[in-house]
Amino acid sequence: MNPWDGPRLVCPYCYSAFPERRIRFRCLGRPGPSGEICPTAEDRALRNHLGRRERLPPVFEANGRRPRAVCPACSGTTDRKVCAVCHARMPVNFGRMRGRTIALVGARDAGKTVFMTVLIHELRNRVGDRFDASVGGSDDHTRHRFGPDYESPLYEEGRLLQGTRRAAGAARAPLLFRFTGRRRGLAGPRPRHTLLSFFDTAGEDLSDEESVEANLRYLNNADGVIVLLDPLQMDGARRAAAAGTRLPVPEGPENQPVHMLERVTDLLMRREGRPNRLIGVPIAVCLTKLDALRAEMDEGSPLHRPQPGAPFFDESDSQDVHAQIQQLLHRWDGPGIDHHVRNHYRNARYFGVSALGGAPTGDNRVRGGVRPYRVADPFLWLLSEFGVVRSGSAPRPPP
């Protein structure tokens, strides 16, 4: 890359990488100095990449390192920057605010949509208060979608969210949030912004290598990966599940947890381009639906502890959980997953979570409200790896 083009950036919408200089501008559609107005038209790039059918003024090339540009058609000045590939409007201070792409992947019925909804709700409420941070939508698309499409059905109506539809032929836009904390500076406390992009993939998008490549392009530019595995697809865990647990239909070989993980690993290995080195991107491997398997854990298990509440990521507690999940993986599904993770990843951590806190009813209703357990742990671990939040170890009470 030519150093004169500026730093390499990753679009938080389509996950394409390009130099800062290649950022484009969209005309404002207002009268220019001569009174001429640029016509609107459907933007094919927006439609193809994000499924948005909007009539908008034209996009044109200019030096994206500058704050403004002059439209070559109407001579009007605009500060509306857009992605060079998908033409989505860039968030405020894009390129000057550190962006973090969190790849959230998992097989069908692993609970990705519910996990993401509960995670963001927790970040905006309990976790935000714990870290003295604010979390909010970073664009109008996210602000308008998250409440009515995700949060309200689950938290207000007690209705389980439908699984994500496969992306092929139906482009979807990610949800963008801004995590803002404070850091000390010479002139006093200063805000520290981190742009977070979440894309919820359909389980079918991971059913074969071709669909992984077509629909998970964002893995190539992910700063961290959260992989959700459904333990109720593991023979040992199915036998140990609490009475009355609604078990998912057994998957075929292509959707077994270890095979889904292997396909993600294949793509990340190609991204790294160095077959003789461990994959460097941090990966959080999470077992979901642990509420159905609490009886399988000893009384002293770290998964019986209350989730940490200190204003830092509790590294000691996380290591305890990691060791416990490692044991459960061997008990429920043999050594395959653990051996795969240890032999392919340089920085991996195991987590156990429950997004709902209990099993839904047969008609997909949430009984007793949403009672999440440790849902934020994998995300906070990644933020601690990025240096966005502090890590430490809280003192343990005597046994």
Image: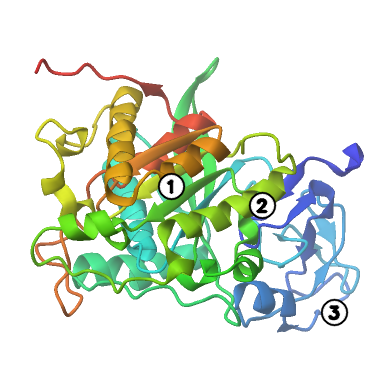
Q: How many marks?
A: 3
Q: Which residue is mark 3?
A: 36
20 left or right, relative to 99: right
Q: Tag on residue 377?
A: none
Q: Describe the element under mark 1 as helix, strand or loop.
A: helix
Q: Earlier in the sequence, mark 2 or mark 3?
A: 3
Q: Bin the neighbour count of mark 3 within 10 Å (Cα to Cα): few under 14, some 14-19, many 20 and up.
A: some
Q: Describe the element under mark 2 as helix, strand or loop.
A: helix
Kind of residue at badge 3: Glu
| Outermost residue toward the front in this view | 334
Give the residue at x 78% y 84%.
39
Q: Which residue is mark 1?
A: 336
395 left or right, relative to 25: left
Q: Nearer the viewer, residue 222 or 128?
A: 222
- Are the two marked residues, 2 and 1, in contact with CB atoms closer than 8 angstroms? no
- Are the two marked residues, 1 and 3, in contact with CB atoms closer than 8 angstroms? no
Q: Position of residue 346 (x, y in %)?
A: 56, 32
Q: Position of residue 29 (x, y in %)?
A: 74, 75
Q: Earlier in the sequence, mark 2 or mark 1?
A: 2
343 left or right, relative to 373: right
Quarter of the picture containing the N terminus is top right
Distance from Cα at disc 2 to Cα at disc 1? 25 Å
Q: Position of residue 3 (x, y in %)?
A: 89, 37
Q: Tag on residue 220?
A: 2
Q: Position of residue 165 (x, y in %)?
A: 46, 77
Give the residue at x 86% y 69%.
33
Q: Describe the element under mark 3 as helix, strand or loop.
A: loop
Kind of residue at badge 1: Gly
Q: Earlier in the sequence, mark 1 or mark 3?
A: 3
Q: Nearer the viewer, mark 2 or mark 3?
A: 2
**For residue 357, what is the image quadrant?**
bottom left
